[in-house]
Amino acid sequence: MRTTWAICAKDLRLYLTTWTSYILLAAFALISAFFFQRLVIEFQYASMQAMQQENGGEGLNLTDWVMSPLLMNMTVFLLFLLPVLTMRLLSEEKRGKTLDLLMTTPIRASEIVLGKYAAGVVMMLLMLATTLLFPALLSHFGASADGPALDWYSVGSGYLGLALLGSAFVSIGLLCSSFSASQIVAVASSFAMLLMLYVIGLAARGQEGLWLKALEFMAINTHLEPFIRGIVRSVDLCYFASLTGVGLILTHRVVEAQRWQ
Amino acid sequence: MIEVEGLTKLYRDRVAIKDVSFNVARGKIVAFLGPNGAGKSTTLKILSGYMPATSGRARICGYDVFEQPMQVKRRIGYLPETPPVYPDLTVREYLLFVGRLKGLHGAALRREVSRCAARVHIADMQERLIANLSKGYVQRTGLAQALLGNPEVLILDEPTVGLDPRQIGEVRQLIVELAAEHTIILSTHILSEVTATCCEHVVIINQGRIVANDSLAGLVQRSRRPGAEQTDSLETIFLSLTEA
């Protein structure tokens, strides 16, 4: 446990003293801010139109019009940015020969993998945390006599869903980072894998029966949407947990196999 | 202290080492000598528990390297060919990290780091980033890392490679000092290293096989040709033993 924490702390230290992580944090916050601003303008436009119609404004609220689409879009930003965040985790240790050090000190491969994973997850959560400003702004300026501006339950479950999705992405990125000493290989393979998980839902279109069900089940969005609508289902929790678990177990196998090469 | 028996390692079908056997007694310093690519690093990697051998046995402090790797890893300090350092950490941060991996913590950890840094004369370098250190200081940082936790056995893979003459002298001096407290096995392809570090015992390996395993004096004695007036230098012995 202590050694897992030592590895996690070391990697966080490296993350927080290099440029890449700050560029990623800034990029994530900026792109999200851009989308946030577009969505708020759209909402403003829609509510002005609604005021001119009688009985308009039904279902017009900041949660469904701004926060939900914003959170859905953040999946794509994570898809692009997380592979860059995770690419150095293990491949840098291989390139710098420091993996030899980790492998010859009295620690288990599982401790290496978990420590690295934890560091990646903390950085991913930091990225998500920068966007908490947006719901905070909405609830501060959007509240009226009719009640609070946001349905905090839906926003909360949406963030939970994104955090779970991010953890799964980190575990897949970590796996790709274990393949070789090249960070390019890591970033390319993890991006390819994540993109596959993202677009697999498109392949479901036009399919029927079991195929449709199977492809839809594998797609990431199928499992993220309920969270964003405020529904926490055990099947979705299991989906993200298994994705994370498979990534971590395979990474552990690759690190162990290192000895046998 | 170190017992190696019939160690063989194949990389797919290429033979890296074949049937390597030798023993090192407690408190001894042994030089592992051989031309480049002879299998020195491979043997040391197996001893450090980094990778398993294809066949054969190796025991350190009575523990089997393959069956009780954790016990072995707690008792060795290993300096690989390339010092395994993180350029973006300071020397102190790095040593604290390795100390934690070796199970040290709290005040004991900080004391141990200071002790090892002082031992290799980098006490005043501790706040420097490793990226900004010269090669000699990086090598010492690597050595300090191996010393953490005061292991009984030190495995040093070419500890002086790539250093300038002054630094080589300093590192050798350091190894001689360390020999008082540790059992040391060091690999090298520089012959003068053997005499300079007072290695009592020499194992010469060539193309994966052991060609000599003797004390320095014994080696010189054995290779003396009848009728020759002078004894051969270690270099002559080495060259004749490693002829392909």
Image: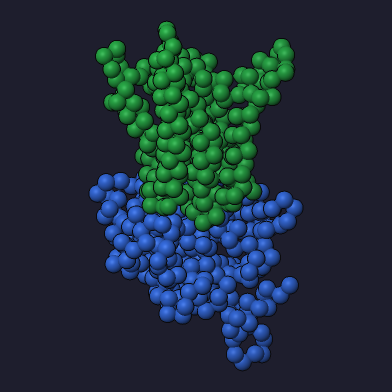
Vertical comparison of B171 with B94: above or below: below
Q: Colour of chain A?
A: green
Q: Colour of chain B?
A: blue
- All told, the count of numbered labels is 0
On the image, the x and y values in percent for residue B236 come to 63, 82
Q: Which image quadrant is residue A54 in?
A: top left
Chosen colour scheme: by chain
- Residue B212 appears anywhere in the view: no
On the image, the x and y values in percent for residue A30 come to 43, 40
Vertical comparison of B120 with B55: above or below: below
Q: Nearer the viewer, residue B82 or B27?
A: B82
Q: Nearer the viewer, residue B150 or A135?
A: A135
Please, which residue is most extreme toward the left here?
B107
At x 51% / y 22%, what residue is drawn? A224
Vertical comparison of B20 with A29: above or below: below
On the image, the x and y values in percent for residue B150 come to 36, 56
At x 40% / y 75%, what residue is drawn? B170
Q: Is residue B41 left or right of residue A56?
A: right
On the image, the x and y values in percent for residue B39 come to 63, 62
Please, which residue is most extreme toward the bottom here?
B229
Quarter holding the N terminus of chain A is top left
- Residue A134 appears anywhere in the view: yes
Q: Is residue A260 left or right of residue A35?
A: right
At x 28% / y 26%, what residue is drawn? A140
Q: Which image quadrant is residue B4 in?
A: bottom right
Please, which residue is most extreme toward the front here?
A52
Q: Nearer the viewer, residue A244 or B202?
A: A244
At x 33% / y 19%, what residue is drawn? A149
